[in-house]
Amino acid sequence: MRPETDYLTEPRQKPGTELSEAEAIERAKQGDADAFQVLYDKHKRRVYSLCLRMTANTAEAEDLAQEAFLQLFRKIATFRGESAFSTWLHRLSVNVVLMHLRKKSLPVVSLEEATQGSDEDSPKKDFGADDVALAGSIDRMQLQRAVNNLPPGYRTIFVLHDVEGYEHNEIAGLVGCSIGNSKSQLHKARMKLRDLLKMNRAEEAGKSRAG
């Protein structure tokens, strides 16, 4: 069996016939590096995009995507098919990014952002609801820049919920916070995003007038 990093550095040796994903998974479990390469080629863009959305840093995203596939190499034998492989790999990749954020001592959810005492100001029924103000025709690049500028804790919750589609109970389990805290963080992330988008629009308008 080849060293676990070879699939990232060696040219791919294509199998004689195209493997299905299910076949590639079973062969990769047995240590077939070509089969693992098939899985890597199929999922590498999605894993990198996820890492980039969560970190807003291309260098970190590349490193974390590689780490996610190293983790996959080590753990693929534990995949039992109870969920789609893409879902399983997605969860594994999210965990890799969250572990990285914790090691950097970036508070994914800070204690002072808990929902105690905020019920009167922000009704719970509003937390986690669809945000019409953000769902309008916003330039995608403007939105991505604004998301990148969110504090790490806010960005993590926003990406997991509004981009990746995780429910608050799932986010709470992944991040290690309460469901109420996850909803509060999302609410505040959306408020912050609106402020950032307003600032961006004001800057663009100023440039247009200056031009």
Image: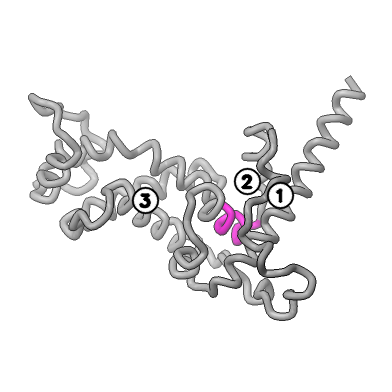
Q: Is residue 134 left or right of residue 177?
A: right
The residue wearing badge 1 is: 193
Which of disc 1 and disc 2 is earlier in sequence? 2
The residue wearing badge 3 is: 90
Give, as a single range, the part of the protein colored magenta: 151-158
Q: Is residue 40 left or right of residue 124?
A: left
The residue at the point 74 percent across, 55 percent down is 191
Residue 127 or residue 77, whichever sits in front: 127
Q: CA distance from mark 1 to mark 3?
A: 25 Å
Q: Secondary structure at mark 1?
A: helix
In the image, is residue 50 above or below residue 19? below
In the image, is residue 173 above or below residue 156? below
Residue 133 or residue 146, whichever sits in front: 133
Residue type of the residue flagged with mark 1: Leu
Give the label, 2 or 3, closer to the camera: 3
Residue type of the residue flagged with mark 3: His
Q: Residues within 10 Å of mark 1 (few under 14, many from 20)?
A: many
Q: CA distance from mark 2 to mark 3?
A: 20 Å
Which of disc 3 and disc 2 is earlier in sequence? 3
Q: Residues within 10 Å of mark 2 (few under 14, many from 20)?
A: some
In the image, residue 25 lies at what x, y percent? Answer: 16, 45
In the image, is residue 98 above or below residue 176? above
In the image, residue 174 lies at what x, y percent? Answer: 44, 66
Q: Residues within 10 Å of mark 3 (few under 14, many from 20)?
A: some
**Residue farthest bottom in this picture:** 117
In the image, residue 201 lies at what x, y percent? Answer: 80, 36
